[in-house]
Image: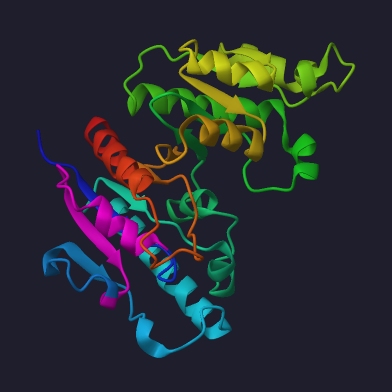
Amino acid sequence: MPRPRLAITLGDPRGIGPEITERALATPVAADITVVGAEDQIAGVPADRRVGVGIWGQGSGERSDDRARVIRAGRLAGHAVETAVKLALAGEVDAIVTAPAHKHALHLAGFPYPGHTEWLAKLAGDVEVAMMLASPELRVVLVTTHVPFRDVPALLTIDRVTRTGRITLRALQDWFGIPAPRLAVCAVNPHAGESGLFGDEEERVLRPAAEALGAVGPLPADTVFVRALRGEFDAVLAPYHDVGMTAIKVAAFGRAVNVTLGLPFPRTSPDHGTALDIAGTGQADPSSMRAAIELACRLAVRG
């Protein structure tokens, strides 16, 4: 079996991306890896395994919050992601792993996307995607992602839930090797609406979508993830960002991996942000980055 080929982007050069990548790769990985980032941060990577996207210049003396420095950091992180996607679309790598980028810096640098998920969908040709958080114990897929909570009810439609569910079912079959995936739908209201007493989204939207998908639910948020952790379901569709993210991070913080479903190539990332406040202090935990690399290897081989 051929070795998987991965492109790893270093993320925001001010953050922990470069250091957790280095530490995650300290133990050999059964893959051919290309590192994409600022040239002075990948100088130690063999020349045939690195792609530089500009110079960072950590010794410039600029303040970490200097606007020009923030823009430059966003530009480097953005160009690294674009380069990795080009490599994947050209068939030069089988999967990509992205270290954390800083959304504010990306926006200032001209990359106006809510997050990697929406951005990657655009770069891959406006494909339909979904955000999964995966760990050995639990898989959660978000129906809505980076939007204010007040906008969730309007965005939560039968069509949106079923489209997200179908993307999830295909990924569970094709990438995770589960022939007949068991999917659950998480409710949006307390006690799954309590027969309409606390809201009608369950009966009006979530139940018809669950039936169309052959999924179980909607089930209350305070029990569905417990049941999934016990092995009843292969994935849970979460109606909004924080209900799903809270469940996975309580269950498996530091071991969970962000997976973008629906792309023509697997993409993974750690389950945390740039941690600008601890960058360079040696406190950053590389466990989630290592998990992201290992999962990308497995998905690349299966995909």
Quadrant in which the C terminus appears: top left
| 111 with respect to 38 (left or right) | right
Looking at the image, which residue is at 46% across and 33% down?
252
Q: Is residue 226 magenta?
A: no
Q: Percent x, y for residue 274? A: 48, 60
> Which quarter of the picture shows residue 258?
top left
Q: Percent x, y for residue 56? A: 36, 80
> Which quarter of the picture shows residue 58?
bottom left
| 220 with respect to 100 (left or right) | right
Looking at the image, which residue is at 43% across and 89% down?
61
Q: Is residue 168 above or below residue 217?
A: below
Question: Which residue range is magenta in the image?
Answer: 16-40
Is the image coloured rainbow, by chain, by secondary structure, or in one colour?
A: rainbow
Q: Extreme left residue here?
A: 1
Q: Is residue 235 above or below residue 64?
A: above
Q: Percent x, y for residue 121? A: 49, 49
Looking at the image, which residue is at 52% across and 40% down?
128
| 239 with respect to 55 (left or right) | right
- Taking depth in this image into account, of 167 and 33 the one nearest to the observer is 33
Quadrant in which the N terminus appears: top left
> Which quarter of the picture shows residue 87?
bottom left
Looking at the image, which residue is at 59% across and 64% down?
112
Q: Extreme right residue here?
A: 197
Q: Is residue 180 above or below residue 243?
A: above
Q: Is residue 153 above or below residue 204?
A: below
Q: Is residue 21 magenta?
A: yes
Q: Is residue 264 visible?
A: yes
Q: Extreme bottom residue here?
A: 61
Q: Percent x, y for residue 302? A: 25, 30
Q: Is residue 57 visible?
A: no
